[in-house]
Image (cartoon, helix red, strand yellow):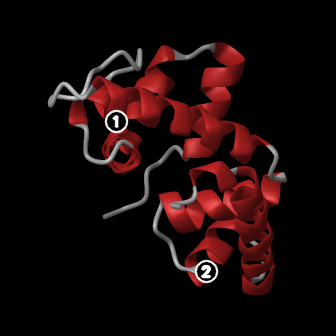
Amino acid sequence: MAPPSVTDAQLIARVVVQDDRHAFSELVRRHQSAVRATLRRLTAGNFALADDDDGDARPSDGAGGDHARAATLRLDMERALAILSEGERAAIVQCYHNDLSHEEAAYVLNCPVGTVKTHILRAKQKLKSRLAAWAPS
C-alpha cells in the first residue's frame, strides 16, 4: 500500500492553522479504529463508555459504585500522568497504551532505546508513588 500523499503532520497543520474540516475528517478516517481500540482497552472493554464523548455512559451491569470507582481512578491517573515530563509521558503512552516494545517506541519517538527505558523507569516510579492509594492491600 502506497503511503498517503498528504502526511498526518500536514493534515494537523491544516486543522490547527486553517480550521480545515476536511483535513480533520481525513485524520479521523485514518486513525479512528486505533483510537477506539485504545479507548476500549482503557475502559476495560466497556464499548459504550469508550465510544461516548461525554463520558456519561453507564456500565451495562448497573454497577454504579464500580463506575464511580473507575471515574475516580481515571481522574487520579490523569493527574498522575500530568506530573510526568513530556518524554516520560510519551514513553509510557507508546509502551503501555499503544503496546509498543521499547525498540518500537524508540523508533516512534526518535530517541535511543536506553532513553525510552530510562523514561519508563522514572515514570513508573512517579506513578507508583502518586497512585499508592490504589495499590491492592
Instruction: Tell me where residue 70 appears, x and y as whole percent.
Output: 43, 36
State the image quarter where residue 108 is shown. bottom right
State the image quarter where residue 43 is shown. top left
Q: Residue at x 76, y 58 (%)?
A: 129
Q: Residue at x 53, y 39 (%)?
A: 73
Left or right of residue 77: residue 57: left
Q: Amino acid at mark 2?
A: His
What is the quadrant of the N terminus in the image?
A: bottom left
**Element at badge 1?**
helix
Task: Say few, some or many: other residues with alpha carbon within 10 Å of mark 1 (under 14 / 14 to 19 / 20 or more).
Answer: few
Instruction: Tell me where residue 83 appears, x and y as whole percent.
Output: 82, 46
Precedes in sequence: disc 2 or disc 1: 1
Residue that label 1 marks: 29
Whether tag 2 and tag 1 are in contact, CB under 8 A, the answer is no
Q: Vertical placement of 58 versus 130: above or below?
A: above
**Element at badge 2?**
helix
Task: Say few, some or many: other residues with alpha carbon within 10 Å of mark 2 (under 14 / 14 to 19 / 20 or more).
Answer: many
Left or right of residue 52: residue 76: right
Alpha-carbon span between mark 2 and mark 1: 28 Å
- Identify which residue, 54 or 64, lies in the foreground: 64
Residue that label 2 marks: 102
